[in-house]
Amino acid sequence: MDVQERFKAIMPKFYAGTHGALVVYSITDRASFEAVTDWLDELRRQTDCKFIMLVGNKNDLEAIRAVSKSEGQEFASKNDLLFMETSAKMSTNVEEAFAAVIKEIFEDTTNPANRRKFEDNEEAKQPMPTSNTVVLTNEPGPAPDARRGCPC
């Protein structure tokens, strides 16, 4: 079995229980934006994921932008996606992107109208992890450490 066949074999396990996802493209690379359609098709084929955010990364490189913000917004709107632009290098909107998707999932799964459907899901019956807990608050946290940014 070659690498591509092994990759295809494990993908359903990778996506198992997915409730939210971020599909990221580079605003400086049109090909990465055009590949978003394939990633969305794959995600929707493998999961029932309802909360997907389209993320245009590298918005710190405005001078070499290849995909306009309005293009990203329009694509997201047509495909019923959340949308945000980020800069991993500058730590701009990265935490906010994850928090927005997590908030949507939380609100959906705690909505009494949706609770039964979520509880019937086999993935939801698995014990929840007790470590690595993330607590989201509306309080401002410490300023991001510039060294934490992506070197790419």
Image (spheres, rainbow, N blue to C red):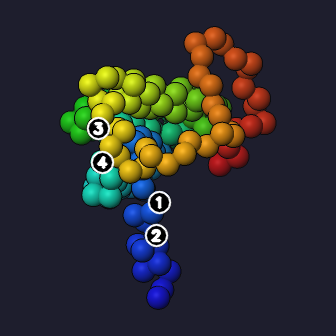
20 shown above or below 109: below
Q: Disc 1 marks which amino acid? A: Phe
**Residue tagged by mark 4?**
48
Work out whether mark 3 precedes mark 2 in sequence or the reverse, and give the earlier one: 2
Where residue 152 sits: x, y (%)? 65, 49
Residue 24 picture location, percent across and down = 45, 45
Image coordinates of residue 29 in percent, x first then y, are 44, 50
The reply to whether the C-beta atoms of the residues labelled 2 and 4 are less than 8 Å apart is no
Circle nearer the viewer, 3 or 4: 3
Q: Real-space Cα distance between discs 2 and 1?
A: 6 Å
Which residue corresponds to mark 3?
Answer: 117
Of marks 3 and 4, which one's residue comes earlier in the chain? 4
Question: Is the residue 103 above or below the residue 65 in the image?
Answer: above
Identify the residue position indicated by label 1 in the image. Answer: 14
| Residue in the picture at 44% in, 38% down | 55
* Label 1 CA crowd tier, 10 Å (few <14, some 14–19, many 20+): few
Q: What distance separates the C-alpha of mark 1 from that of mark 4?
A: 13 Å
Residue at horizontal 52 percent and vertical 33 percent from the top: 98
Instruction: Please name the residue that numbered disc 2 is placed on.
Output: 10
Query: In terms of sequence position, does the residue under pointer 2 or pointer 4 come before the other?
Result: 2
Residue 105 is drawn in which quadrant?
top left
Identify residue type, mark 2: Ile
Quadrant of the rendered image containing residue 150:
top right
Q: Secondary structure at mark 1?
A: helix
Residue 82 in the figure: left or right of residue 61: left
